Image: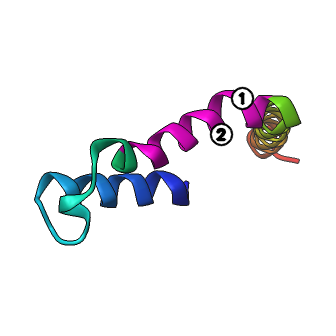
């Protein structure tokens, strides 16, 4: 996520022509975007972070659903 924030800031500085980013070539401005796409589409699935995060979310949702059922039953 920090890379996404850096990309947005750099891109806005480039569009608004704020020095020193305003004078950069377009490929230097798009480099963080390329790295971000590489991270999200190649590296994260390769090391399994996307599946781990999904499993954690499913476990948390199941636990919350069970707690809700217990509260509504009066236990």
The residue singled out by tag 1 in the image is: 42
Figure label count: 2
Q: Position of residue 8 (x, y in %)?
A: 34, 53
In the displayed orientation, state which residue is furthest to the bottom.
19
Q: Position of residue 58 (x, y in %)?
A: 80, 32
Q: Nearer the viewer, residue 23 or 57?
A: 23
Q: Position of residue 5 (x, y in %)?
A: 43, 58
| Contact (Cβ within 8 Å) of mark 1 with mark 2 | yes
Please say if 4 is above or below 49: below
- The residue positioned 77% from the left and 43% from the top of the image is 64
Is 51 positioned to the left or the right of 11 in the image?
right
The residue singled out by tag 2 in the image is: 39
Q: Nearer the viewer, residue 4 or 25?
A: 25
User: What residue range appears in magenta?
Assistant: 30-45
Q: Nearer the viewer, residue 19 or 15?
A: 19
- The residue positioned 87% from the left and 37% from the top of the image is 47
Please say if 56 is above or below 2: above
Q: Quadrant of the N terminus?
A: bottom right
């Amino acid at each position: 996520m920090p890379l996404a924030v850096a990309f947005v800031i750099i891109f806005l500085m480039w569009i608004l022509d704020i020095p020193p980013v305003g004078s950069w070539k377009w490929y230097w401005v798009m480099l963080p975007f390329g790295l971000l796409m590489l991270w999200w589409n190649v590296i994260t699935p390769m090391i399994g972070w996307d599946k781990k995060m999904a499993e954690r979310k499913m476990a948390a949702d199941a636990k919350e659903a069970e707690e809700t059922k217990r509260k509504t039953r009066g236990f």
